């Protein structure tokens, strides 16, 4: 069995072209991680297609349980005592981001947490720029839907003289290497990518059927702690 890998480079047109290229080479099945906000019709092809996205996507065959991951990280912050939280989601339409934020909201709303949401691009510079220009107010934690946003936010906060987590806790999502080496190391949610890949391959080759959500794991590191001040701005003024 041979495996061909293609990268759409965040371009919907290139995603379509990559798929057509593979079909032209006679592939017997496709495993597709669709781009954010770019519709992908799995039924339009003559070969089996396994979509790896999120539970909210009706075409999804396997993914992490992103909504439960959102609940896990939100529950962690609530248990620490955070009652004012800034959520940073993807600015682009994304099933993954929507599910993660929905899970956070499940817990925050039930606990009576005051939440604000903003959408940014899911990358380091966007997180950093948000933190540099953010009027912090009463929030005691930033809950980001992606590690890249969270690591960027930590960088921007440190530039402003805001201590993490003493003045403001920060959480991410995905357990990327950058979250492990940033100072302080990032509290985040880890995916079991091996199990997802195995199920996607099994579906694509006809050895399994039906959709499946892989459990996620909370990884607690040094970027979160109990809130020590009701207002970060007052503390650093």
Image (tube, rainbow, N blue to C red):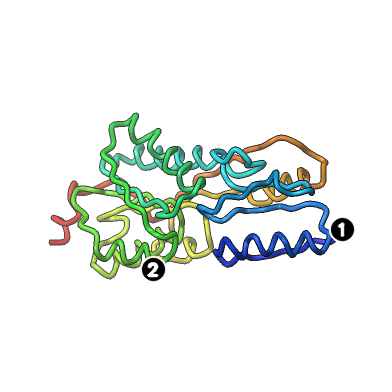
Q: How many marks?
A: 2
- Work out whether 50 lies above or below 159: above
Towards the viewer: 225 or 194 = 194
Q: Where does residue 20 sit, x and y in percent of width and height? A: 72, 61
Instruction: Locate residue 87, reporting x and y percent.
Output: 34, 48
Horizontal arrangement in the rendering, residue 63 relative to residue 131 (left or right): right
Residue 199 at x, y percent in the picture: 72, 44
Inter-mark Cα distance, 1 to 2: 40 Å
- Which corner quadrant holds the C terminus? bottom left
Residue at the spot 26% in from the left edge and 46% down from the top edge:
227
- Residue at (36, 37) in percent of width and height: 79
Q: Is residue 214 left or right of residue 147?
A: right
Q: Quadrant of the N terminus?
A: bottom right
Q: Which mark is residue 55?
A: none
Q: Position of residue 162 (x, y in %)?
A: 25, 62
Give residue 63's quadrant in the image: top right
Going from N to C along the chain, the mark reached first, 1 or 2, is: 1
Instruction: Report the front residue among 127 and 4.
Output: 4
Q: Residue at x 33, y 41 (%)?
A: 80
Q: Outermost residue, right direction? A: 1
Disc 2 on helix, strand or loop?
A: helix
What number is the disc on residue 1? 1
* Front residue of this view, candidates 90 and 79: 90
The residue labelled by disc 2 is: 125
Circle 1: element type = loop
């Amino acid at each position: 069995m041979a495996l061909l890998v293609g990268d759409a480079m965040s371009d919907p047109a290139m995603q379509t072209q990559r798929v057509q290229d593979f079909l032209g080479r006679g592939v017997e099945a496709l495993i597709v991680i669709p781009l954010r906000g770019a519709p992908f019709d799995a039924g339009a092809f003559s070969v089996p297609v396994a979509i790896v996205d999120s539970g909210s996507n009706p075409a999804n065959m396997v993914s992490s349980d992103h909504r439960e991951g959102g609940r896990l990280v939100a529950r962690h912050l609530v248990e620490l005592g955070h009652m004012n939280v800034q959520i940073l989601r993807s600015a682009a339409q994304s099933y993954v981001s929507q599910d993660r934020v929905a899970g956070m909201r499940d817990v925050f709303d039930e606990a009576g947490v005051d939440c604000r949401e903003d959408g940014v691009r899911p990358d380091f510079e966007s997180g950093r720029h948000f933190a540099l220009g953010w009027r912090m107010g009463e929030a005691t934690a930033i809950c980001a839907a992606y590690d890249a946003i969270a690591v960027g936010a930590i960088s921007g906060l440190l530039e402003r003289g805001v201590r993490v987590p003493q003045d403001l806790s920060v959480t991410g999502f995905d357990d990327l290497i950058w979250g492990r080496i940033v100072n302080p190391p990032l509290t985040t949610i880890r995916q079991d990518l091996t199990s997802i890949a195995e199920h996607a391959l099994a579906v694509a080759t006809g050895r399994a059927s039906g959709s499946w959500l892989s459990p996620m794991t909370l990884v607690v590191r040094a970027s979160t702690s109990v809130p020590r001040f009701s207002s970060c701005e007052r503390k650093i003024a």
